[in-house]
Image (cartoon, helix red, strand yellow):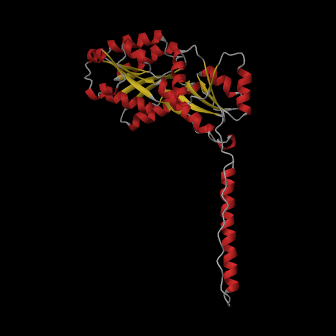
Amino acid sequence: MPQVVACHRALPSVPPGPGRAMASRRRWAGARALAACCLALLALLCAPLAEAAEILVLSDGSVPQYREAQAAAKGVLPDAQTVDVNTPELKAQLERAAAAGGVILAIGHKALLAAQGSGATVVFCMVLGPSASPAKNVTGLRLEVAPGLQLSFIKRVHPGARRLGMIYDARTWSAYAKEASEAATAQGLTLVSRPVSDAKEVRAAFAEIAANIDALWIIPDPALVNIEIFNFLLVTTLERKLALFGFFADFTRRGALASVAPDYAEIGKQAAKLAADLAGKPAAARSPLPPSLASPGGLTINAKTARQLGIDLSDDVQAAAKQVYR
């Protein structure tokens, strides 16, 4: 308990006369006001300090990308408890966090599934948007990079590409396709898109649009783009002298012109900051949670592929890339 110094002062004497009664009333009014100020200060000094709620970091340590995001998150939240999603005591730990009004930072889809049923406030990352829960107690960073950011990088890498092909699964990626179409229009690009419902339809969809595009943009849908489909698209686009843009740095290393890939460390940092911000509020004051955000991304470029396609990479765009494969 902090020491409190008594607030007092000598009351001035009032000479006798007609104004004595009025002066007396003013004197006592001032004394009462000063006493009220002292009581308010005492209340502030003695009030307990609000403490941030506990943050529990939940992840699957067997996945290297999750470990990278987790390490970055722990740099922001050094005191947060870290729990592996495969621990036998997981349910009890999640229940304790929920009962205490804590916040769970769930890294990866498995961690999100485990956390969202606990009732605690959940911040997720390293999860694709279509797989993320729309529950009221859940927010976070979607793994995919915002279409507008990807398209801005594509324009810088290949200014001559005005018509971009995009193949997407209409069942799960329609909202992303709509956002991408709006972003393309805003940046003066034309998006030539084809919805499919199965990876087996990708080849035929590409054949339909190949003659009408300058480049093909692969969006991050693992249900459509496996290594077999990627190799097909890589070979076919090179044969047609079309640029191929991917969503993993490994796609760039294998021959795609460029990729805008999620930045795992930055994702971990931003998710941790969001978790800390929510933990600093009483549970009742967190609702409604902020909407989920797209992830930050980093550009990689394949200079050899650019030469094959006759694309001159500017010094500025190469300087902006996290990696240039030569």
Q: Tell me the residue at 68%/71% (across/down).
A: 31
In the image: residue 277, left or right of residue 254: right
In the image: residue 287, left or right of residue 158: right
Let me know if residue 278 appears in the view: yes
Q: Quadrant of residue 37?
A: bottom right
Let me know if residue 190 appears in the view: no
In front: 8, or 41?
8
Above-or-below relation of 35 to 242: below
In the image: residue 59, left or right of residue 318: right
In front: 294, or 59?
59
**How many numbered badges does the structure rendering display?**
0
Residue 199: percent from left, percent from top? 52, 14
Residue 108: percent from left, percent from top? 58, 22
Q: Which residue lies furthest to the bottom in this view?
A: 18
In front: 123, or 61?
61
Above-or-below relation of 6 to 227: below
Residue 311: percent from left, percent from top? 26, 21
Q: Tell me the residue at 66%/78% (across/down).
A: 26
Residue 321: percent from left, percent from top? 35, 25
Q: Quadrant of residue 287?
A: top right
In front: 22, or 2?
2
Q: Tell me the residue at 67%/26% (across/down).
A: 115
Q: Quadrant of the C terminus?
A: top left
Q: In which quarter of the image is residue 278?
A: top right
